[in-house]
Amino acid sequence: MARKNLIEAVERNAAATPSTEAPPARPLAGLGSPLKAGGAIGGISKTLGSINSSVERAREIEAQLLQGAAVIEIDTDLIDSSFVSDRLGLDPRQLDELADQIREHGQQVPVLLRPHPETEGRYQVAYGHRRVAACQKLGIRVRAVVRSLTDEQLVVSQGQENNARANLSYIERALFAMKLEQRDFSREIIMSALGIDKAALSRMLQVAKQVPSTIVSLIGPAPSVGRRRWLELVDLLTDTVAEQVIEVLSGAGAAEAESDARFELAFRAARQDKSKLRKEKPEQTVWVATDKAMRVSFAGSGKKVVVAIEAADAERFAAFLQADLERLYAHYRERAVQD
């Protein structure tokens, strides 16, 4: 909450602070005309300097963005998303609200871009995807700082700015961590990007890897659902339970529900199905040899029964049975005909 208040304070202060034009910036290749420096930098820096130390990291992010850097305007058609996504889509309602704010007050906080590493004349977002999308919706240029960033620097900036704004849900952060791991970023880089320790990262990766992607996609970001509830869902899921959850989330009415409500639907379905599976646990019978040296259990019913052999020489006995199965089966068939 403190971080969210920080950014809101930055936006309010910037909206209320008279614009101060910086010296004209040099034109960037491909943009055609000189780009103007932003006017609210002084107000943002002043506000950041007074923020409580409990949000020091968020203050430093904004300060680093502004320090010695010109804020320029860039056509949104020249901007590509980060090479690793951190959202399960943009909420249309929130995007409309942001676009309305920018239309009324202007874009007060710039985004951070880097020159596209593969395409000359284009740019890639480090952070500020929603602001870019809102400006694109409005048909205006986006105010940005452009810096040369390595992949590692980009994902750290991307993750830390999202932490400061506190507008990514737990599952989105967990998926972001998993995507970074899949791209072979070190645990240290991932922890730095997300501002978490090893234990928290392990739990995030557990959730991201064990909740099927189909279920995550059907639920969505679930902004109010935190670590504990996602881990509880992980504990409930089996292949059979997951199939039931997907069926419920794909049913009529689920798509119209809010994302948090869809999580609750999934959780209730998983809990009910897991309980049902416990009740339907197959019966088990056990045969024990007269010398107590061997124990054979039979579990299941209908078309599937599992046989388990427990003994010091279980492997040899299993091989003995396999070698004699044809005779035993023939004997069984004879008895079955007589019965």
Image: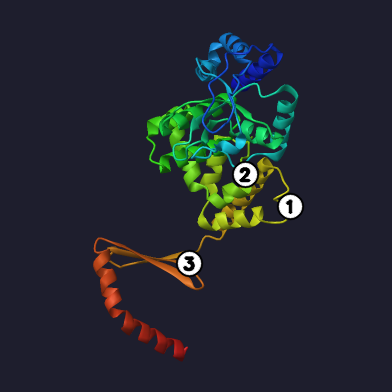
Residue at the location (36% across, 86% down)?
A: 330
Q: Quadrant of residue 310?
A: bottom left
Q: What amino acid is at disc 1?
A: Gly
What residue did someone put label 1 on? 253
Q: Quadrant of the N terminus?
A: top right
Q: Is there a contact, CB below 8 Å, between mark 2 and mark 1?
A: no
Characterize the local packing of mark 2: few (<14), some (14-19) or many (20 or more) Cα atoms within 10 angstroms.
many
Q: CA distance from mark 3 to mark 2?
A: 37 Å
Residue 161: % across, % down? 54, 26
Q: CA distance from mark 3 to mark 1?
A: 37 Å
Residue 50, percent from left and from top: 59, 8
Decide which of 191, 308 is in the foreground and name it: 191
Residue 237, above or below 114: below
Q: Which residue is mark 3?
A: 300
Q: Position of residue 56 (x, y in %)?
A: 52, 15
Q: Earlier in the sequence, mark 2 or mark 1?
A: 2
Marks 2 and 1, how far apart in space?
A: 15 Å
**Numbered disc in front, either 2 or 1:** 2
* Along the line of sight, the residue nearer the viewer: 116 or 249: 116
Kindly identify the residue that appears in the image at 62 percent across and 29 percent down.
Answer: 142
Dot 1 crowding, Cα within 10 Å, few <14, some 14–19, many 20+: few
Secondary element under disc 3, as helix, strand or loop, is strand
Q: Is residue 272 left or right of residue 86?
A: right
- Comparing labels 3 and 2, the label whose residue is closer to the camera: 2
Q: Are marks 3 and 1 in contact (CB under 8 Å)?
A: no
Question: What residue appears at the point 58 percent right and 30 percent down from the top-left corner?
Answer: 32
Residue 274 drawn above or below residue 229: below
The residue singled out by tag 2 in the image is: 220
First of labels 3, 2 by sequence position: 2
